[in-house]
Image (cartoon, helix red, strand yellow):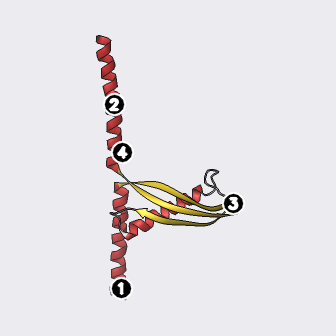
């Protein structure tokens, strides 16, 4: 009986640790899905295009920055043996995880950029 209680206590501890770790990760970051398309001709990359950024709560500036990061990641993956094609296009779906603090800084950066352009227009 003592062994059974000890084993159940250990199992309960591991289950709660696993559950809490997942919740903590979800609290701290955002996950944004992005589609990119890589065109190949004779096993060489001709074009990389980010086709869709799935983010309902993002501003246009934030979507552009996320699309730039998706382009960079697609560029890094372009020559992997699982991705490389002889002729055709490879549709690449990826998730970009961003911490909420960094995402908020990106919005503030955009707001500061807008403020400086307004001031420059007033001065001119």
Mark 2 and mark 4 in contact? Answer it, CB < 8 Å: no
Callout in the foreground (1, 4): 4
Q: Residues within 10 Å of mark 4 (few under 14, many from 20)?
A: few
The answer for how far apart the CA atoms under marks 4 and 3 are is 39 Å
For image coordinates 28% across by 10% down, the residue present is 1
The answer for how far apart the CA atoms under marks 2 and 1 are is 58 Å
Residue at the bottom extreme, as displayed: 124
Point out the tag, 3 or 1, that comes first from the N-terminus. Answer: 3
Q: How crowded is mark 2: few (under 14 residues within 10 Å), some or many (20 or more)?
A: few
The answer for how far apart the CA atoms under marks 2 and 4 are is 16 Å
x, y (%) of residue 101? 34, 56
For image coordinates 49% across by 66% down, the residue present is 51
Kind of element beneath mark 1: helix
The residue where tag 4 is placed is 25
x, y (%) of residue 11? 34, 24
Point out the tag, 2 or 1, that comes first from the N-terminus. Answer: 2
Q: Which numbered dot is residue 43? A: 3
Quarter of the image with the C terminus is bottom left
Kind of element beneath mark 2: helix
Point out the tag, 1 or 4, that comes first from the N-terminus. Answer: 4
Callout in the foreground (4, 3): 3
The answer for how far apart the CA atoms under marks 2 and 3 are is 47 Å
């Amino acid at each position: 009986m003592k062994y059974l209680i000890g084993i159940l206590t250990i199992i309960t501890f591991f289950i709660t640790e696993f559950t809490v770790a997942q919740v903590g990760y979800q609290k701290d970051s955002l996950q944004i899905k992005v589609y990119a398309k890589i065109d190949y001709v004779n096993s060489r990359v001709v074009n990389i295009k980010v086709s869709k950024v799935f983010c309902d709560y993002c501003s246009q500036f934030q979507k552009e920055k996320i699309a730039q990061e998706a382009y960079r990641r697609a560029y890094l993956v372009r020559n992997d043996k699982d991705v490389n094609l002889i002729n055709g296009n490879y549709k690449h779906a990826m998730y970009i995880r961003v911490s909420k603090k960094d995402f908020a800084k990106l919005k503030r950066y955009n707001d500061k950029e807008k403020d400086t352009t307004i001031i420059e227009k007033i001065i001119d």
